[in-house]
Each structure stands twice: as C-alpha cells, then as structure tokens.
Amino acid sequence: MVCTLCIKHKMKNKFAAKGAANISKKSAVKEHAKCKDHTDAKKLETARIQMESLQNQIFLSDANVRHIIVVMRVVYFLSKNNLPLRLLPSTIEMMKESETPNISNAYTNEISGCEFLIAITKTIEDQIWKELSDVSVPHKSN
C-alpha cells in the first residue's frame, strides 16, 4: 500500500516510495497518518485546493465585474440616446451574437436595466451636488 498524497507532494517515507513493499497492517497505516511527512502533505494539499478555489473565485469575480461594466455601458447608451430600457435584452443578445467579450446572461433584463440606470443617475446626481457645494458664491455688499 502506498500513500498517493505523500507521493504527490514528494515526501520521503516508506509509504511514498514507489514499488514499496505492501504495507497493509492497520497499525502501520494509523502510524503513517500521524507522521510529520503525511501531516505536511495534507497541509500542502489543503493549501493547494484553497489556492485553486481562490483563483477560480477571483477569475469569476473579475469576469462578473467586466460583464456588469458592459451592461452598464449599454444602459448608459440607451438612456443617452433616449431609447427604452426594454431594448436592453435584445441589445445584449446582439452583442453576444457579434462575439463581444465579457457578456453573459446575468443582469440583462429590463428590471436590472432600471436598477443600473438608477445607480448611474444617483452617482451623477451626488457628484453634481458635491461640485455645487464646493463652489463659493461671492456675496454682494450694498
């Protein structure tokens, strides 16, 4: 019997040696499970799995952010050109058919379009009020 985990992480013990004698005693297996090499191999494997999972999450998160940016640009385009938000799904579909990168089916309905438009409007409104509050108006004296 060999320990594939120890082999994978290149540990040096009798369970990690390829072609090792058949070690099948229950006590030897229990002892191996507690040895430093095996516990280190388990830690390395756990770290590898966590890193892989984190990389997948970052990739998905980045792709999702890029998709949201594309949808917000479409919402902005529609509102800037005074076009109804009900055109959002078909506009996104047209972009997908023309192989525009970073497009998926998420956030492509009219309700999401309205929510994006509200967010864009609120951001612009807040910026305008901030700029107005920063302007100093000279007072006339009689």
Image (tube, helix red, strand yellow):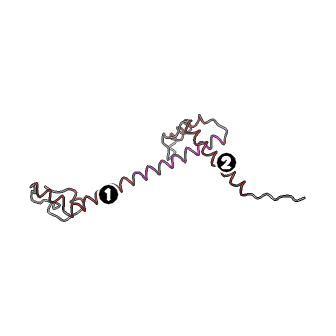
In front: label 2 or label 1: 2
Query: Which residue is drawn at the image coordinates 28% and 59% (left, top)?
Result: 43
- Looking at the rendered structure, the kind of residue marked 2 is Glu
Is residue 23 magenta-colored? no
Q: Main secondary structure of the magenta part?
A: helix
Residue furthest toward the front? 142
Q: Residues within 10 Å of mark 1 (few under 14, many from 20)?
A: few
> Residue 51 location, x and y as percent?
36, 57
Determine the residue located farthest toward the bottom in the rendered image.
12
What residue is at 88 percent from the left and 59 percent from the top? 141
Disc 2 secondary structure class: helix
Residue 120 falls left or right of residue 29? right
At 43% from the left and 49% from the top, the residue drawn is 60
Mark 2–mark 1 Cα distance, whole angstroms, equals 46 Å
Task: Place residue 77 in its image quadrant.
Answer: top right
| Identity, as a three-letter code, of the amino acid under mark 1 | Arg
Disc 1 designates what residue?
48
**Quadrant containing the C terminus in the rendered view:** bottom right
Q: Are marks 2 and 1 in contact (CB under 8 Å)?
A: no
Q: Residue furthest top?
A: 86
What residue lies at 59% left-to-right and 46% top-to-bottom? Answer: 73
Q: Position of residue 30 (x, y in %)?
A: 15, 56
Q: Is residue 112 above or below residue 26?
A: above
Residue interval drawn in magenta: 56-79
Residue 117 screen position, x and y as percent: 61, 42
Query: In this image, 125 relative to 110: left or right?
Result: right
Q: Position of residue 116 (x, y in %)?
A: 58, 43
Q: Which residue is mark 2?
A: 125
Q: Secondary structure at mark 1?
A: helix
